[in-house]
């Protein structure tokens, strides 16, 4: 039986929490969308079982209310070098003892490589971008002397990634776009599509609307497409952009940004909710697998101007909750903002759509059903 979040299922009752499950997460150096999902899986889906992360800071999950958190490879995966070291994860997982009992891997990179003595289910944010959907983009970003070696290793990494995927009893995709990738790259038909839910802390706040656009996320290029977004505002000095977040490319982009673009650094959940609620629109120029930022913004009653690819096609309704543009270029972004500014928007309807469509209850029910059936 195939369970999907956005279609009726045979049983809409809430199953009990499955027991004897451990949640595996990739890397927790920042607490973003993937970390929120892993915390929810641990607390509401996997029976309050332990959570392991391949690397990172355990306090991020402990602060979110997870009692038992283990960093599996603290010396290997440090914040300064985990991206380079992570390519050794497929081999490292084979040399590490399996997790006792059942495993629910929340994977955008390597956590699905973690072995278990019991059943393994994978909640897939995306197959590893660097070796699959984003291989060409990431290879081109490397220094020329490294590209040949990277391309040569690609076949081996793909074979190991595919083998780890086939060790799972079931896959759940976070969007239909990711479900298609899982089927294309792994030859696995996901048992369900379960969109990540919005956090109830994101709701309309009693703050005035400002004539300001907002971007929120990890500042990582070229993936997040912050650079062409900034260039579109350079071409339109009458518009203001506030960038919330941090990342490895923040300093470089801040140094050359025009005066109408402000970098304000990381903000708390409450502060981000206020920024969403006061923004004219939230901008989302990247092709994400799902993308929680548009859902959070819409839950606050704020329309979204997004690249019409990936998960945004499943979250943003053209002309009703936002505007979609076809290419992540300054010209296309500027044209989309022109269209946005000519339209009128129903803030209450936008918030209601997000809160109903991406509810926590639906996500938890579908995930529990899959675990019980695995």
Image (cartoon, rainbow, N blue to C red):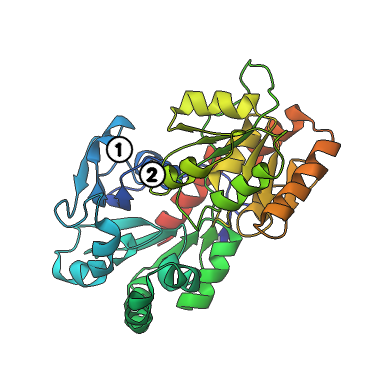
Q: Which of the pair 317/103 is nearer the observer?
A: 317
Which numbered disc flags the more N-terminal residue, 2 or 1?
Answer: 2
Quadrant hosting residue 283: top right
Determine whether 247 is above or below 160 in the image. Answer: above
User: Could you tell me which residue is drawn at 57 percent across and 39 percent down?
Assistant: 215
Q: In which quadrant of the rendered view does residue 357 lie?
A: top right
* Residue 264 circle label: none
Viewer-proximal residue, 261 or 12?
A: 261
Decide: is 295 above or below 126: above
Q: Position of residue 193 (x, y in %)?
A: 55, 58
CB contact under 8 Å: marks 2 and 1 = yes
Tag 2 secondary structure: helix
Which quadrant, please, contains the N terminus? bottom right
**x, y (%) of residue 72?**
18, 53
Residue 257 can be seen, yes or no = yes
How many other residues sit within 10 Å of disc 1, few (<14), some (14-19) or many (≥20)?
Answer: many
The residue wearing badge 1 is 61
Who's the residue at 56% across and 53% down the image? 225
The C terminus is located in which quarter?
Answer: bottom left
**Disc number placed over residue 35 in the picture, else none:** 2
Left or right of 195 on screen, residue 111? left
**Residue at image coords 23%, 63%:** 85
Instruction: Kindly state the secondary structure of the residue where label 1 is placed.
Output: helix
């Amino acid at each position: 039986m195939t369970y999907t979040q956005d279609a009726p299922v045979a049983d809409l009752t809430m199953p009990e929490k499955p027991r004897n499950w451990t949640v595996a997460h990739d890397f927790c150096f920042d607490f973003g969308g993937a970390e929120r999902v892993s915390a929810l899986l641990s607390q509401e889906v996997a029976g309050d079982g332990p959570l392991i992360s391949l690397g990172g800071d355990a306090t991020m999950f402990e602060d979110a209310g997870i009692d038992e958190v283990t960093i599996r490879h603290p010396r290997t995966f440090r914040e300064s070098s985990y991206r380079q070291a992570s390519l050794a994860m497929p081999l490292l997982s084979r040399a590490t003892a399996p997790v006792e009992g059942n495993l629910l891997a929340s994977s955008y990179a390597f956590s699905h490589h973690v072995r278990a003595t019991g059943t393994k289910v994978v909640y897939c944010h995306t197959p590893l971008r660097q070796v699959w959907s984003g291989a060409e983009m990431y290879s081109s970003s490397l220094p020329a002397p490294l590209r040949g070696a990277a391309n040569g290793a690609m076949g081996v990494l793909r074979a190991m990634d595919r083998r780890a995927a086939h060790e799972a009893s079931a896959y759940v995709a976070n969007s239909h776009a990711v479900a298609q990738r899982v089927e294309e790259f792994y030859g696995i038909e996901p048992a369900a599509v379960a969109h990540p839910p919005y956090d109830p802390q994101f709701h309309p706040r009693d703050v005035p609307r400002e004539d300001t656009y907002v971007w929120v996320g990890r500042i990582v290029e070229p993936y997040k497409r912050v650079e062409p977004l900034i260039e579109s505002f350079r071409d339109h000095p009458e518009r203001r952009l506030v960038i919330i977040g941090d990342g490895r490319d923040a300093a470089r982009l801040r140094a050359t940004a025009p005066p109408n673009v402000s970098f304000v650094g990381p903000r708390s959940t409450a502060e981000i909710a206020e920024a969403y609620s006061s923004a004219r629109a939230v901008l989302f120029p990247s092709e994400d697998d799902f993308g929680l930022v548009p859902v959070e913004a819409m839950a606050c009653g704020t329309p979204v101007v997004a690249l019409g690819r990936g998960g945004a096609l499943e979250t943003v309704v053209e002309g009703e909750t936002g505007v979609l543009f076809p290419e992540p270029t300054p010209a296309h972004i500027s044209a989309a903002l022109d269209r946005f500014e000519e339209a009128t928007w129903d803030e209450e309807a936008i918030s209601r759509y997000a809160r109903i469509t991406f509810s926590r209850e639906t996500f938890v029910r579908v995930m529990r059903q899959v675990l019980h059936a695995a």
